[in-house]
Amino acid sequence: MALRQMQTLVQMIYPPRCLSCGGLVESDFGLCGECWRDTPFIAGLACDLCGTPLPGQSDQAEHCDDCLTTARPWSQGRAALTYQGRGRRVVLALKHGDRHDIAKPAARWMARVTRELVTDQTLILPIPLHFHRLLARRYNQAALLGQALADELGCDFSPDALVRPRATPKLDGKRREERFEILCDSLSTHPKRRSQIEGRDVLIVDDVMTTGATLASAAEAVLAVGATRVCISTLARVAKDT
């Protein structure tokens, strides 16, 4: 009873706000009706490898043009949003705006589309930042999403099993071929965490997928140390029509 009264008091002093516009909402970690309507959630038919939305309907796994022409080292992939409009603003707020509060509801959105990919053997791993970038940003947004998604799905989580031993340049404006060249072998597994990965299903988590170069490097790294099956889950997918 005392805890419930305390929660009520906190809500009276700090009423729940929409994650996007800051307006009042009925519960924590939510969007107001207008922002929910305008947030580009991915629903319906989507690419089975990256989650990008596809036109039409199908009763079998379908792949987008990118995944038909680019080999993916993972088995399946999902994304919760397209990287445009309010979806883009939510991602950037989490990534650069110290909005840690976004991670938990974002993980719920990711869990909605990702739940079918996990098993009782799934280990969730976030895409890591290089040490210097982590110092500058002070947190890894992929790790925040990964931990919240692991809690939501009841999976094991290892925040440091993947490492980025060398700094890579910012990829804004880089062409697809340049991204893959820069990010090839950019990620590896932590020597002390490889036993956690061997013989396990792995779900790699990141905030955004653009070309998939970073996720491919991560998938190849965990497969090299004995992961049995690799899937990916991202908060947002950059689609060609955005």
Image: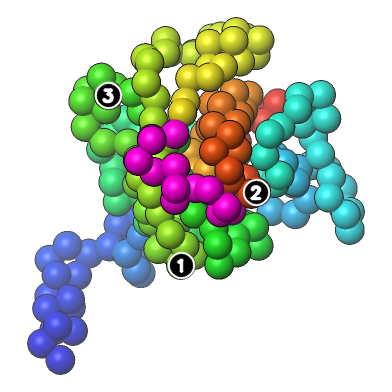
What secondary structure is found at the residue carrying circle 1? loop
- Marks 3/1 in contact by CB < 8 Å: the verdict is no
* Mark found first going from the N terminus, 2 or 1: 1
Occupied quadrant, residue 200: bottom right
Relative to 49, 154 lies left or right: left
Q: Which residue is mark 1?
A: 154
Q: Which residues are magenta?
A: 189-201
Can residue 40 be seen from the camera position used here? no
* Mark found first going from the N terminus, 3 or 2: 3
Q: Which residue is mark 3?
A: 131
Q: Which residue is mark 2?
A: 229
What secondary structure is found at the residue carrying circle 3? helix
Q: Residue at x 75, y 54 (%)?
A: 44
Q: Nearer the viewer, residue 151 or 38?
A: 151
Q: Residues within 10 Å of mark 1 (few under 14, many from 20)?
A: some
What distance separates the C-alpha of mark 3 from that of mark 2? 28 Å
